[in-house]
Amino acid sequence: KELQYEVKQGRKGFGIPGLDEMLSDGLLEGTITLISGGTGAGKTILALKFLLEGAEKGEKGIFLSFEEPAAQLLNTARHLGWEMDRHLAEGRLDIKFISPVELDVDKHAFEILDMIREKKVERFVIDSISSFENSVSDLQKYNDYLWALGQQLRRRQINTIFTAVNDDPFSPLIVSKTQISLTIDNIIILRYVEENSHIKKVLGILKTRGSDHDKALREFEITPNGISILGKLDRADMLK
Amino acid sequence: KELQYEVKQGRKGFGIPGLDEMLSDGLLEGTITLISGGTGAGKTILALKFLLEGAEKGEKGIFLSFEEPAAQLLNTARHLGWEMDRHLAEGRLDIKFISPVELDVDKHAFEILDMIREKKVERFVIDSISSFENSVSDLQKYNDYLWALGQQLRRRQINTIFTAVNDDPFSPLIVSKTQISLTIDNIIILRYVEENSHIKKVLGILKTRGSDHDKALREFEITPNGISILGKLDRADMLK
Amino acid sequence: KELQYEVKQGRKGFGIPGLDEMLSDGLLEGTITLISGGTGAGKTILALKFLLEGAEKGEKGIFLSFEEPAAQLLNTARHLGWEMDRHLAEGRLDIKFISPVELDVDKHAFEILDMIREKKVERFVIDSISSFENSVSDLQKYNDYLWALGQQLRRRQINTIFTAVNDDPFSPLIVSKTQISLTIDNIIILRYVEENSHIKKVLGILKTRGSDHDKALREFEITPNGISILGKLDRADMLK
Amino acid sequence: KELQYEVKQGRKGFGIPGLDEMLSDGLLEGTITLISGGTGAGKTILALKFLLEGAEKGEKGIFLSFEEPAAQLLNTARHLGWEMDRHLAEGRLDIKFISPVELDVDKHAFEILDMIREKKVERFVIDSISSFENSVSDLQKYNDYLWALGQQLRRRQINTIFTAVNDDPFSPLIVSKTQISLTIDNIIILRYVEENSHIKKVLGILKTRGSDHDKALREFEITPNGISILGKLDRADMLK
Amino acid sequence: KELQYEVKQGRKGFGIPGLDEMLSDGLLEGTITLISGGTGAGKTILALKFLLEGAEKGEKGIFLSFEEPAAQLLNTARHLGWEMDRHLAEGRLDIKFISPVELDVDKHAFEILDMIREKKVERFVIDSISSFENSVSDLQKYNDYLWALGQQLRRRQINTIFTAVNDDPFSPLIVSKTQISLTIDNIIILRYVEENSHIKKVLGILKTRGSDHDKALREFEITPNGISILGKLDRADMLK
Amino acid sequence: KELQYEVKQGRKGFGIPGLDEMLSDGLLEGTITLISGGTGAGKTILALKFLLEGAEKGEKGIFLSFEEPAAQLLNTARHLGWEMDRHLAEGRLDIKFISPVELDVDKHAFEILDMIREKKVERFVIDSISSFENSVSDLQKYNDYLWALGQQLRRRQINTIFTAVNDDPFSPLIVSKTQISLTIDNIIILRYVEENSHIKKVLGILKTRGSDHDKALREFEITPNGISILGKLDRADMLK
Ligand SMILES: Nc1ncnc2c1ncn2[C@@H]1O[C@H](COP(=O)(O)OP(=O)(O)O)[C@@H](O)[C@H]1O
Ligand SMILES: Nc1ncnc2c1ncn2[C@@H]1O[C@H](COP(=O)(O)OP(=O)(O)O)[C@@H](O)[C@H]1O
Ligand SMILES: Nc1ncnc2c1ncn2[C@@H]1O[C@H](COP(=O)(O)OP(=O)(O)O)[C@@H](O)[C@H]1O
Ligand SMILES: Nc1ncnc2c1ncn2[C@@H]1O[C@H](COP(=O)(O)OP(=O)(O)O)[C@@H](O)[C@H]1O
Ligand SMILES: Nc1ncnc2c1ncn2[C@@H]1O[C@H](COP(=O)(O)OP(=O)(O)O)[C@@H](O)[C@H]1O
Ligand SMILES: Nc1ncnc2c1ncn2[C@@H]1O[C@H](COP(=O)(O)OP(=O)(O)O)[C@@H](O)[C@H]1O
Ligand SMILES: [Mg+2]
Ligand SMILES: [Mg+2]
Ligand SMILES: [Mg+2]
Ligand SMILES: [Mg+2]
Ligand SMILES: [Mg+2]
Ligand SMILES: [Mg+2]
């Protein structure tokens, strides 16, 4: 009874050369990953790419957005040369947009789980749990709900990404006051750093529960060709 | 139904050489931009220039000011050699000043939207949403209102600029505790830095949703000839 | 109706060589200036000099003091070799001292405005608005009152200086939590810096609404001969 | 009556070469140890290894988890090449998982103590007391409960490890606002440090009540072969 | 009526070579001075010396202590080779000790002023106003009382020293949240600095209302021979 | 009446070569000393040694512990080669342990003072007043009680040590928000510093009321042979 569920051993990648290697071939199957970073750091795009990579392999995905409507996401994808339209049309991808003003956790919680079950979803994104947190008045309730949701997702072995917004985009602080670390298996941190009068983006993997990972901090770029992982930066103390 | 509105692909510039290039030819059409900076950093002047550039191209603009009355803005424009008077006279520009003491959000919200609709406004500025925030007692209400306003502006494809005041003019902290990042597509940060016993101004683009942008931090100057984007500063760690 | 008042183009100086040059010949006529600094930084003396310079030119001035009684100010002026006594005697200068304990904003507000109107005052100082703030229980009321006062002063084109006390004399933080930046056109910051085991004073102009200004940070001295603007300091990062 | 219990003199090791040496052959028998660190620092794995080392020597252990279910822990152990399955099967190890949502301190407190007594447990882990703290509404009650639990464990001479989560994984701050230092005999701190664009892990022993310990800060690694203590890092000021 | 009191021009020294020079021959007559510093910085000893110097010149002094009883102060003076006993015996000096527990501001306020008037006191010390602040429940009341007391002392031209305790002895922060800067004419700051593995003491004059002063930061020592002002320290940034 | 008690001139040492010298032959008789430091810094051991040194000289001592039961302290002493058992047996030393959960200040306050009086105690330790503070709900009450206790101890000329826990073991912050500095005559600070990838301990004397002391910061070690004062550390800015 204690051993409620199996832990799968497969890997679910982003299809981003460099990043999948850093994760020892992708995220461990059935785990929940937090992508944390300031506004504009690339959380939405990284999470979107995770679903698109799944869709390429025939895995169904749902992108639950509390921030940008589908049109916006579609547009972003087009600019990056990603075939999101096709996957949407052919049913491998679904975007569910709930504005923060409309969000009613008690009501939507069931819908989300139903949707995941019905559609046999394999990859799932919530962008962002910060919006979600803001719309729940009571922190305890938020923690409980997140935990329960996490349990359901884990039991169903859904490969999940939560994004979280750092209020200060230049600080590495991740999660505080909430019990989110209980729900999360893996943590990817995105940060702005300044080097040479340029704002650059850096990515690091802080934790992968039950698995090894690369400990390097790498610069990455979002360009019209998508996301590229670059080398190390000269700057020291990026995480201070 | 989810894909409520089209995302336009045109660009709306500031008419400031250097800045428009940094934005890949201007701001993406129909998006909402935040200009954040300390007092005196140049937020008002930058936002004004955005409207004037539109007026030059025949696009109608409204400048909603909670800080300076029209006479003040006119005077500033004259000193910078900008033909604001003509655009005002010929109806391409309108300045609406509401003192923070008089501001009644519930009443003015409708008026603003009506005004935008009637006048077929294409460029719109609120200077500043910080004043606006201060006059709403309830943060949740402020967030909801901003979101709703943002939705209306986006649906009508209005090219919008919000300015926001940083309490500490020498820190890069931008937006916190409010859900403004949900409403905002692009972020331009203005900062004071000290170099060589001089107070200098620096501009950087932190985020442009769905579009590439220059990652450089550039010095800029406000002189009697207007705004000029200069080169890089020697000082490192401007954003720390 | 929106263009409620004219913006004058004249300049009002301090009569301090170096400082007036930094301000492009003085403060723009009819504007409100904030002098911010720690205790002992020189706020009172700078504000006093502004009135004395006006008196020399025949412009009437009122110094509204919440900190030091007239005798104290007179004494300071005498030590600095300033002819305040004569200007007081000949009616070009008036000192109104209200102790913070006695201050009753609702009552004094009208008196102040009456006094300014009756005496055809051209230069006006409040030393300090921090004392003033402390005696108003409600921050919102303080903001509203300051705004209203600012509007009256601006409409009457009074050249006004407000001083404000920084709690930490070695930090550049200026104004926070209050909406004072709405009321203020120009900001002069005074700071202590330590160089070579000496406490030195530094002056910088952060903002002049609608006008250019020097961006340098200069050391200044208060000596028995008055205020002198000196050169640059070797120390870097004075504003950090 | 004051001298309520004997203090044993034996040692209980982790079976990790390097770490046991740092502790002068292991933790003093019958003491309570805090392992403190950010998320992903290795607290769970270190605590698990402590129990497995005991199991190898025939000492019964209980792992009370408020964070990860047994399956997750089993999986982690397998990946690290540890024979946790065998010890579980043969009754030398027990994992008790209570989800933070279900945790009812008043009820579970007795159960835990009963379990420890019945099963003649010699090594005991609570992972983590931070989760535990979050589920008790009243800080005073939490402190009292922790103290009482600590007393019981000490009286029964149980070799105990508590883990605690640092909210900021890059800061050395350990315990605050709670009276946990009263209950704790030994403190091991785990920290992330950044060196050379890599996130590294560092371990130090801050305190061992009544015993000497190594004062070095050592890098350590979690690899598919388990935990290895490495040498010193070049980086200075790791604890700042 | 405004010019309620004369400002005297004489000087009142400490009798400490070096310090009196820094103050241009002593504190301006009839002013109120704040000595601020961490615990053990030397506030009590400096204030005591001020009274003893007066006593040597035949000026009556009262030391109002909320911290140390007379015996303690006497003992300290003896160790420093100061003839406090004689001055006490001959009535030139009086020590009034009120324990913080007994202090009743409303009652003692009158007593203090009566005492000062009756005894024709010329020098007066309150050690410390921090104790005093702690025993007044209401900050506003404390501010009002301090202001009123200051006014009385100034009107009677009493040469007054207030000491204030910095909570963090290694920070230069002086006075905050209270309106004490209104009451104070001069500020002397005492600080600990660390140089060369030694804790040293540094003294600086931050402000003297209406008078010039030395801007140097000097090391000082308390030895069995009393207080000596030493030279400059090599350490830079003592005030950061 | 003011001179309520004599100030003795003898010295009470720790019996630790180096430390007694730093204190000019020990603590001044009849004074109250604060030992402040993070957890594990050595407060308990230092305070214990103070009592043992007294016992060696035939002076009775009481160790009032809110943190560790007698057995624990005995064990620690044994490991350090100290003959605490003998002193306990022969009545020169007494350990009174009150668990923080049981502590009832109103009740225990009398008991403590009775005990001190009856047993003609000459040295007294409270380990720690932080635990004590935590168990008093009202800060004002805590301050009053501490003051009253301090007065009693001083009147009886008891050589007293209070220990206090710093929440952040790597910061030099000592005492804040409480009026403890009123009660304390001497302050010894213990700190962790990091040098060369090692956690080292440093000791400094911040204040000795009425007496000279060494201003050096010295490394110290707790080894199986007891406490040794070592030399200076290379690291600068240990107190920052
Ligand atoms: N099989 C493995 N191989 C290598 N490293 C692993 C393995 N399993 C876990 N890790 C490492 O251990 C970390 C998690 O350790 P854990 O004890 O769960 O941290 P904490 O309890 O402090 O949050 C992961 O981030 C990863 O770096
Ligand atoms: N078409 C594009 N070409 C280049 N860069 C782009 C493009 N679209 C978006 N970006 C980059 O991605 C950033 C936004 O990423 P996003 O994932 O929305 O951030 P977040 O979700 O963390 O706020 C933009 O600031 C921009 O730098
Ligand atoms: N005519 C001018 N010539 C040069 N600089 C000017 C002129 N007018 C304004 N400025 C500069 O612009 C600054 C004010 O910019 P503004 O946009 O009002 O700042 P903000 O809105 O961020 O408070 C002034 O501090 C000054 O440095
Ligand atoms: N006669 C004088 N000669 C030289 N310096 C003086 C004289 N009078 C005042 N000062 C200087 O001016 C400072 C006080 O300036 P003030 O304007 O009162 O400061 P603030 O109002 O910012 O507290 C004093 O600390 C001193 O350094
Ligand atoms: N027998 C011993 N040998 C060496 N060091 C010891 C011994 N006993 C204790 N220590 C050291 O003393 C420290 C604990 O000191 P303690 O006085 O209990 O600290 P505190 O009361 O400040 O928390 C331990 O962390 C250890 O470093
Ligand atoms: N007889 C003495 N010889 C040398 N130094 C002394 C003597 N008496 C006191 N001191 C020094 O003075 C310090 C206390 O000064 P004090 O004025 O009481 O500080 P404060 O009032 O700021 O807390 C002591 O810490 C010690 O360094
Ligand atoms: Mg996003
Ligand atoms: Mg503006
Ligand atoms: Mg002043
Ligand atoms: Mg864990
Ligand atoms: Mg004192
Ligand atoms: Mg202890």
Image (spheres, coloured by chain):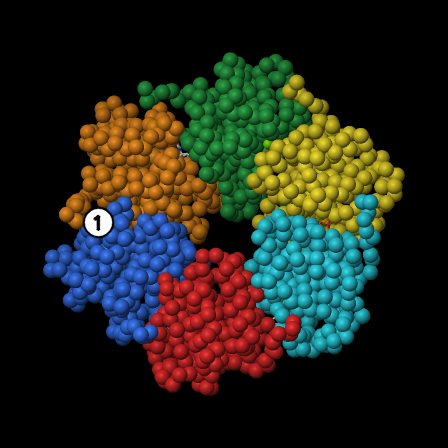
Chain colours: A red, B blue, C orange, D cyan, E green, F yellow
Q: Please tell me which residue is depicted at 54% across the width and 33% down the height of the picture.
A: E134
Q: Where is residue F56 in the image (x, y as percent from the top left)?
A: 84, 39
Q: Nearer the viewer, residue C70 or C77?
A: C70
Q: Nearer the viewer, residue E26 or A30?
A: A30
Q: Where is residue E94 in the image (x, y as percent from the top left)?
A: 58, 19
Q: Position of residue D175 (x, y in %)?
A: 62, 54
Q: Is mark 1 within 8 Å of ligand 8?
A: no
Where's the N terminus of chain F, which quadrant?
A: top right
Q: Say if residue F217 shows up in the picture.
A: no
Tell me which residue sits at (36%, 20%) in the image. Answer: E4
Going by the image, does F141 lie left or right of C78? Answer: right
Instruction: Report whether residue C166 is seen.
Output: yes
Please state if C157 lies on the left or on the right of D104 as rendered. Answer: left
- Determine crowd level at label 1: few under 14, some 14-19, many 20+ residues with C-alpha closer than 10 A: some
Quick one: which residue is furthest to the left in this view?
Answer: B90
Does residue D147 appear left or right of residue A65 in this picture?
A: right
**Quadrant in which residue F213 is drawn:** top right
> In this picture, is E16 found above or below D49?
above
Along the viewing direction, whichever of A58 and F183 lies nearer the viewer: A58
The chain letter for the residue carrying disc 1 is B
The residue depicted at 54 percent of the width and 66 percent of the height is A147
Q: Is mark 1 on a helix, strand or loop?
A: loop
Q: Which of C83 and A90 is in front in this view?
A: A90
Q: Mark 1 points at which residue?
A: B69
In which quarter of the view is residue D173 placed?
bottom right
Q: How many numbered tags mark residues here?
A: 1
Image location (x, y in percent) of residue A231: 49, 75
Q: Answer above or below: position of E236 versus E159.
A: below
Which residue shows up at 59% across the image and 21% down it? E95
**Which amino acid type corresponds to the residue marked 1 in the rendered image?**
Pro
